[in-house]
């Protein structure tokens, strides 16, 4: 089995305005994938009414999924990657671009034989 890194993070204290901006969230996903030298295949987003959005970056190496909670000024981030880099860097990029404070809830390496 290939080495897969699973990372789940929560970024708090973000601007609700930024969390509602689909273009910005997609830009952040694209930047994070590029920084990690991951192959972005497609980005899909959905805006909820009245608040929140979900976005997924489909990667050749797996995916990055986010769910925003503007009413709580937070965003949930899930990264699954068989790339060579440390997937926690995706959460760090998002933390910087959103101006929040990140907490890594899970960081697990699966396989690698």
Image (cartoon, helix red, strand yellow):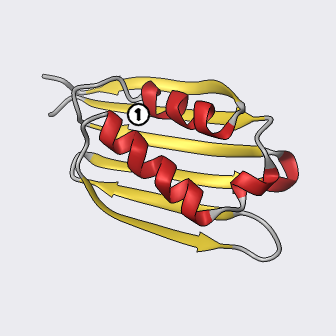
Image coordinates of residue 108 in percent, x first then y, are 41, 24
Quadrant into which the N terminus falls: top left
Image coordinates of residue 93 in percent, x first then y, are 51, 32
Q: Residue at x 41, y 33 (%)?
A: 6
Q: Residues within 10 Å of mark 1 (few under 14, many from 20)?
A: some
Figure check: 74 above or below 70? above
Quadrant into which the C terminus falls: top left
Q: Residue at x 47, y 32 (%)?
A: 7
Whether residue 68 appears in this view of the structure is: yes
Image coordinates of residue 15 in percent, x first then y, are 79, 46
Quarter of the rendering containing residue 90 = top left
**Horizontal side, residue 12 vs residue 97: left or right:** right
Figure check: 55 above or below 61? below
Q: Total number of numbered labels? A: 1
**Horizontal side, residue 64 vs residue 55: left or right:** left
Helix, strand or loop at mark 1: strand
**Horizontal side, residue 10 vs residue 40: left or right:** right
Q: Residue furthest right?
A: 71
Residue marked by disc 1: 6
Figure check: 61 above or below 47? above
**Horizontal side, residue 101 vs residue 65: left or right:** right
Quarter of the rendering containing residue 42 = bottom left
Q: Residue at x 45, y 49 (%)?
A: 29
Image coordinates of residue 33 in percent, x first then y, are 35, 43
Q: Residue furthest bottom?
A: 49
Figure check: 38 above or below 7? below
Whether residue 64 appears in this view of the structure is: no
Front residue (pair 106, 38):
38
């Amino acid at each position: 089995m290939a080495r897969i890194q699973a990372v789940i993070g929560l970024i708090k204290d973000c601007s609700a305005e930024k969390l509602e901006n689909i273009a910005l969230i997609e830009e952040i996903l694209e930047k994070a994938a590029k920084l990690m030298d991951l192959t972005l295949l497609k980005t899909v987003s959905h805006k909820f009414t009245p608040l929140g959005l979900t976005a997924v970056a489909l990667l050749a190496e797996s995916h990055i999924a986010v769910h925003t909670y503007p009413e709580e000024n937070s965003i949930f981030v899930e990264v699954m990657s068989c790339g060579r880099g440390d997937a926690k860097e995706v959460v760090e990029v998002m933390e910087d671009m959103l101006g929040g404070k990140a907490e890594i809830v899970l960081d697990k390496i699966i396989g690698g034989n």
